Image (tube, coloured by chain):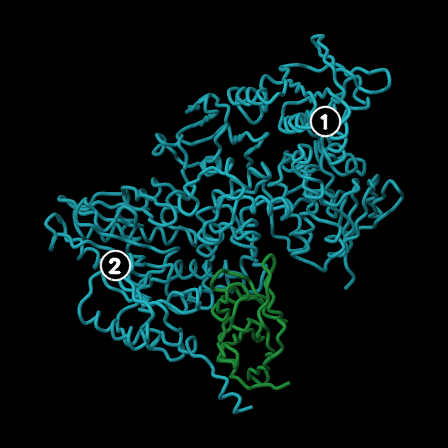
Chain colours: A cyan, B green
Amino acid sequence: MKKLKLVMIGNGMAGVRTLEELIKLAPDLYDITVFGAEPHPNYNRILLSPVLAGEQTFEEIVLNDLNWYADNGIKLLLGRKVVKIDRKARLVVADDGSEAEYDRLLIATGSNPFILPIPGKDLNGVIGYRDIADTQMMMETAKTHKHAVVIGGGLLGLEAANGLKLRGMDVTVVHLGDWLLERQLDSTAGRLLQQSLEDRGLKFLLPKLTAELLDNGEGRVCAVKFKDGDVIPADLVVMAAGIRPNSDLAEQSGIACNRGILVNDTMQTFDPRVYAIGECASHRGIAYGLVAPLFEQAKVCANHLAQLGFARYQGSVTSTKLKVTGIDLFSAGEFMGAEGTETITLSDPIGGVYKKLVIKDDVLVGACLYGDTADGGWYFRQIRENHNVSEIRDHLMFGENAIGDAGHQGQSSTANMPDDMEVCGCNGICKGTIVKAIQENGLFSVDEVKKHTKAASSCGSCAGLVEQILINTVGGAADVKPKSEKAICGCSDLNHGQIRKAIRDEHLTSIPAAMAFLNWSTPNGCATCRPALNYYLISTWPGEAKDDPQSRFINERAHANIQKDGTYSVIPRMWGGVTNASELRRIADVADKYNVPMVKVTGGQRIDLLGIKKDDLPGVWKDLDMPSGHAYGKSIRTVKTCVGSEFCRFGTQNSTQMGIDLEHALFNMWSPHKVKLAVSGCPRNCAESGIKDVGIIGVDSGWELYIGGNGGIKTEAGEFFVKLKTAEEVMEYSLAFLQLYREEAFYLERTVHYMQRVGMEHIKQGVLEDAERRKALHERLLFSLSFEQDPWKEQLAKPQLKKEFDRIALQQLEAHA
Amino acid sequence: MNWLDICDLEEINVLGSRIVSGPKGDIALFRTSADEVFALDDRCPHKGGPLSQGIIYGKRVACPLHNWQIELESGEAVAPDQGCAHRHQAKVENGRVLLALNSATECA
């Protein structure tokens, strides 16, 4: 088949990202031609400031070198500005006369700096700040001239000012507004910022209106004159008063524009053969300037160019995370405060920290942080997801404290970390390595950092730190999204919530059916999405959906826990941690018979046999003659107990029996992630009920239930849920909560994270407030469990399952051959 | 080429694998959803994880230890990871899986 012709006008980040996404989806669909007005391949425009400041070289910020274009068969025409689009002939013409025909046209012309329409704007030494040529011009000027004036106290202006100061110029920032960054900061934070920049030697004039740029008699600027008559010297004037979508070319060719090229939710313009993306495009009235939304647009646009035709761009909620010269700023939502809002403020001018939270009707609607932005992402999530914050209001100001506390010396802020400090304790990755990978590979999301560096790819406790490093390195371009909004994996654009809903609403009962209905882009998914789909299917349609062992991680296929040397560990179940002489004797016999290298007591009150060969697993299970402990699964693990009132002189309730009963009730339960319970017989809490998914504490007058505790990566104390009188109630409420979690949580989401996402109020409504609903949840869990059986016994009973464990010997084969 | 007759195709689950005890260690035999078979030494180039125990998708397997993605056809790790698992020849004929050992020392 003859290839279609795709022409792209513009060679910037949004456009090239679209091509990258397109090549992933449909590598052979198009012959691609790219016109770039600049003489460079695609580079990281966000890092122009570090280049100006002398922290990086241009070569270091190139994202796609010339080899990339060649390797992908892309015809690259550099230094050529397209001057005409002939839509009838489907042809574009560049200023040097070169032409290209198209079947599809992608306009990605970006934006232009807004140049104030004042006398003198065309003098030498007056520039915008947009590309590498502007940057190089500033660097050259700094060598020979003294006075620089930056017009505009926005982000770009401050970065330019800082860079020029570092290059040795005397810099004045002129700003029209009453304070700096008035669209990103409130007045208090803006003034704090100004103060700290003044401490670094920058000068500010504000509010000040520029009237005219004066000529030195030789066509070069020499001074800036203001409306109030003041005059200051200027050898260089940088206009950083905003950007305008560069839509002239499209407009001239008759494509509808209105402050940007108008596009629909598929990034298509009014001419169906023509797409527009990036800063030149106006989507639902907004022309985005941040990288994260532009990359979302790129994904959607590529989807349609690849003729898949199902992705939709519906706009982005953006926050601003800025890094101005090493000062951390964050703002999101309606941070100014308005009628009907309440404000919580923390102000520490000496420590350089200022935080303001704006609340409306018990929902966080805005946040403005200065100096300490570690919790910016968490606040942003609260704002976007409209959580009711009334219950956490008293400690809302102190943030999520979400940064993991194991494996990186308790550090919770990366800004002042030295480069050689270890961030990822699992893989031994230091801060400097992560920063380098982000810069050299042009990474914008934590997932990309994980892939390239392995940081945060094991236990994930440092993901918060990695996110901070990412934000500090690429600023507002960082693509930081909560799991609830992220696509499940590269195989689909849908997020976990959308997939769960579709499986329920459309009565999907098999992985192939789900993938077909949801337009999966791969024939059989990947190691990330298949286990999730399998769980969603069997938990939504128990008895109907068939479990797919090949879509389970090996531990859940072998029903044992794989170890680093490929052997397995076997943990038989001991109900409530109670065992007897006969079981212990069998365990001892198995240890002897199979030469088990290590026998270890676990934290879950049972016994682990480590170093067992896979072939031996069925034999070990048979000889143990005990139930599977599910120590390997996203499933019920154990119910830890203390000895309770039966023996303990302090015990108030029979916690051991309660634990045994719960463990029997939950036996064989699959769940989004592992589930651990504990029952203590008195408030001394010897079974550590405070750090379990469901923790139960017996008191003289009954039982207290705590949920969402976690003793792992980040210690989380469980939250008090309800006080109950009888053991029957404990059973019903615990099972109802766990069923709600099973039905609503995302795969690999522990109870604590599920609770943080949906809110305690939601869980209380589901389980506590409506007795009918609670009973229904309880019933559904029992129904679901009625289809499950002890996997060890099942494996032994069904000979057809045995091949998972048998190896084929080659010696016999050679005899055949 | 010295083809060894191994087993019925049906002895390997779809998107599953079997381990063959080879003269120089275990060989993982994979079956894709398109009923193609591939054979690699059962050792991930990363830390020696048993690839036979991984999740198979498309023409790749994810190592169960640290989730490296390995191409079944070439044995190469998917970028940005780098490394290669030793590859053997495998094919299906008349419903039987045949294997030819590749004794070359180079990876591919």
Residue A26 circle label: none
> Which residue is pictured at 55% across the width and 71% down the height?
B33
Please state the horizontal and vertical placement of residue B28, each as a whole percent of the image.
52, 74
Left or right of A28 on screen, residue A689 = left
In which image quadrant can residue B107 be found? bottom right
**Nearer to us in this view, A106 or A673:** A673
Left or right of A674 on screen, residue A265 = right
Left or right of A180 on screen, residue A99 = right
Q: Which residue is mark 2?
A: A605
In which image quadrant can residue A221 be found? top right
Q: Are marks 2 and 1 in contact (CB under 8 Å)?
A: no
Q: Is residue A235 above or below residue A728?
A: above
Task: Count all numbered tags in the image, as a single digit.
Answer: 2
Please state the horizontal and vertical placement of residue A739, each as a whole percent of the image.
33, 53
SS at circle 2:
loop
Badge 1 crowding class, 10 Å Cα cut-off, few under 14, some 14 to 19, many 20 or more, is: some
**Nearer to us in this view, A654 or A105:** A654
Q: Which residue is mark 1?
A: A114
Badge 1: chain ID: A
SS at circle 1:
loop
Amino acid type, label 1: Phe
Name the image quarter holding the N terminus of chain B.
bottom right
Amino acid type, label 2: Gln
Please state the horizontal and vertical placement of residue A727, each as a whole percent of the image.
18, 52
Q: Let me know if marks 2 and 1 both belong to one chain.
A: yes
Q: Is residue A292 above or below residue A776?
A: above
> Which residue is pictured at 49% across the width and 51% down the height?
A428
> Which residue is pictured at 67% across the width and 41% down the height?
A44
Q: CA distance from mark 2 to mark 1?
A: 68 Å
Which comes sooner in the sequence, label 2 or label 1? 1
Name the image quarter holding the C terminus of chain B.
bottom right
